[in-house]
Image (cartoon, coloured by chain):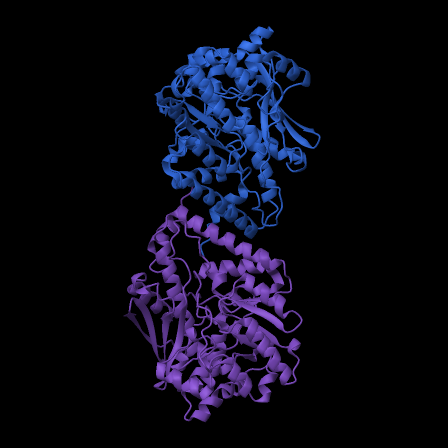
Chain colours: A blue, B purple
Amino acid sequence: MNVDLAERAHNHNWKLDPIVRSLLDTDFYKLLMLQFIWKNFSGVHVTSETTNRTASVRLAEHIPIPALIEQMEHVRRLRFRKSELIWLAGNTFYGTRSIFEPAFLDWLEHDFRLSEYEVAERDGQLVLHFAGLWTEVTMWEIYGLALLSEMKSRVALGKLSELELDILYARAKTRLWDKIEKLRQVPEVRISEFGTRRRHSFLWQEYAVMAMRAGIGQSLSGTSNTYFAYKHDLEAMGTNAHELPMALAALSNSEEELHQSQYRVLELWQKSYGGELLILLPDTFGTTQFLQGAPDWVADWTGQRCDSKDPFVAGDEYIAWLMSRGRDARRKRLIASDGLDVDEILALQEYFKGRIRFSAGWGTLLTNDFRDCHPRGEHDLEPISLVCKIVSVEGRPAVKLSDNAHKATGPVEEIERYRRIFGTSPVLGAEVLV
Amino acid sequence: MNVDLAERAHNHNWKLDPIVRSLLDTDFYKLLMLQFIWKNFSGVHVTSETTNRTASVRLAEHIPIPALIEQMEHVRRLRFRKSELIWLAGNTFYGTRSIFEPAFLDWLEHDFRLSEYEVAERDGQLVLHFAGLWTEVTMWEIYGLALLSEMKSRVALGKLSELELDILYARAKTRLWDKIEKLRQVPEVRISEFGTRRRHSFLWQEYAVMAMRAGIGQSLSGTSNTYFAYKHDLEAMGTNAHELPMALAALSNSEEELHQSQYRVLELWQKSYGGELLILLPDTFGTTQFLQGAPDWVADWTGQRCDSKDPFVAGDEYIAWLMSRGRDARRKRLIASDGLDVDEILALQEYFKGRIRFSAGWGTLLTNDFRDCHPRGEHDLEPISLVCKIVSVEGRPAVKLSDNAHKATGPVEEIERYRRIFGTSPVLGAEVLV
């Protein structure tokens, strides 16, 4: 009856439907790492780059570069809003107040900038390349990945009629809720939402987070998405990532220093943060060598995140290592975060029950599981394995070995050198789905 | 951002969210029958009544009587709108123009009224009772059933949160689209939507009809819902129902006249309507006796609707009967309309392919299949078997025997008498689901 003439005209006036709407729309660990970098490595220059590990999906054929650049320019124009900074200053993270220093928040407000970037086409892929101060480059990771992921969704959605869109989302919601109903059967399970980088879209991620909160209540520990934590009073989750040991390794000046850099990053980290933020990520250069060579104080850290090794094996290995170091595994935390879905989460919960405090970082298959939901049976809404990794630090190549050779990054000869230094032999783990 | 203050206030001002929004929101056969009654039986008085054959669902405990009465009063205040009458006059139904006489349309515009009614509580059930001229009572059937059906839905929906409602409809849409995808595999299938009386809701029926049109295109022959046919340029489908032979039988003054009334109604009908509207509904007093005793001209009718007998058996019986009468079954139509769902529709299509022109009247399991969709696993949104049947004609009891003794209606002693006269033995068919 009542057409809202102003609204209709306004909708036609839209210049851009932004994908990233706030600088808080990033993983919380990026903010923790940003403060760490700002404090310890403020003059260091790096480059980083996106890679689509799902080579069969040729992103350059899907995503129009001008539209992508518009979105990236929009992100570069964003600033932290006053109420966002007040929330960062005043909120309690992992039970600790004032995790962010006033000087850092002041810098965020006045001096934080995102680096320059290039968009290149390479073998049918779109590559985002970032170069500049580490503090300017690091934050691109999540914004860039979320942009590519949602641009890809939008192109696929643009081919569907209104009814087909409705069916698509009905199916995805049905899938999501079926997963949530399975999780409800196990109230002791603990899950953090980790799906920002490869989400279907901002709005769908928000829907998934809200559905999880309504469906599993306290079993949802929180979300890695800082904006949703801020907007919906959730716990912001996450600690650190491979970026730090990769950069410190690249900055090393001898083989001995390189080998030790994986522990030096922990020393620096625990100077900056304490308590629940002491979560090891031991797989950068191979988990087994990391644990064997670790100084004893490493066993005092709160827990471990396993991101590339079979989590059943990684958890057993961690528990055995803790016992060998005389620590009680039942007081430690094990976080799995590598391409999980519901059945594996519940199997892990059952497997580690009473042995270690298990929790799941549930990402892409929570926020982008549109497999078999397409109304015409097409595949262009299925998730792909996009990553954004440090490529060089002060001109030196950065390397990750990982527990899964599929996930190794860096120049081939450097990977060889690192394997020799860390004594890590390449193990091909599971094919990387997401 | 922009709250539409006027809309928000308007939403709070709503006095009633009507279930029946137009007098066209009824099965098309009711309008054909109404003209037939208006022409041939304008002075006859009848009573009719609703029955919930799903006794386990105690409607009186779900539906508040005052709200039901508000809805019924709303229907009684409705009038045929000018553009609706113009459409009835100008549209082509089953390839024929001017099916409705100008005098009838004039009467519809100026003199049509719905009868008085009573709402009674009986054994936990709500019973709608209608009494008056047949022309005033007959149209209550679909309005009354649709009101009860949607009132029941609304009470169940009222217990759900916004998210739960979203999940419910996501699941129902997923279910619906999965059915449509099955139907798409068989382009030669022909389906009419027959689900008005037991629909989940007006809006959901409209959604289902629109999804069917988008999904199966020409395989959707049309809809029995006259309002949707009018609104969406679809074919209006349907011819006649048990009400006519039941009433003519009740008006009979001898056993011979009673027995012959089942054919006399056809004679009268073909005087009023021709062509595609000549669809037999032979099961009122038993299909087998009907076919055996039928005059030869009955075999000239266009087809048969089977509504209570196993449609595989009924179709075979009809084809054999046509052959015995020297007619070519491949030029006749067989319409099944009794509690169908997709798998049975496709099995029937395959079974009768090349033997008779099969089509399905798909009702409740198209417009109200919310089984296993409830977000808390409850059952109060599942369809029930509601009917509204003629109880008496000029004070004499009305009887239906049906091919399924579960569906027989009328006083026990009258059913016995009818069984004797028609030589029909009671056969218990399938349990009535919808």
Return the x and y of residue B48 as percentages of the image width and height.
37, 77
Task: From the viewer's side, name the closer residue of A32 and A351.
Answer: A351
Task: From the viewer's side, name the closer residue of B338 and B239.
Answer: B338
Question: Does residue B414 appear to the left or right of A373 in the view shown?
Answer: left
Q: Is residue B93 visible?
A: no
Above or below B303: residue A157: above
Query: Which quadrant would the C terminus of chain A be assigned to in this image?
Result: top right
Return the x and y of residue A329 as percentages of the image width and height.
41, 22
Q: Which residue corresponds to the image point at 32% horizontal and 64% vertical from the top-left?
A: B58
Picture quadrant of residue A116: top right
Return the x and y of residue B150 as percentages of the image width and height.
39, 62
Question: Does residue A43 appear to the left or right of A65 in the view shown?
Answer: left
Q: Is residue A200 visible?
A: yes
Count numbered badges in the picture. 0
Question: Does residue B81 appear to the left or right of A53 in the view shown?
Answer: left
Above or below A33: residue A11: below
Query: Which quadrant would the N terminus of chain A be assigned to in this image?
Result: bottom left
Return the x and y of residue B211 as percentages of the image width and height.
54, 57
Above or below A13: residue B200: below
Above or below B322: residue B21: above
Q: Which residue corresponds to the image point at 61% horizontal and 48% vertical from the top-left?
A: A377
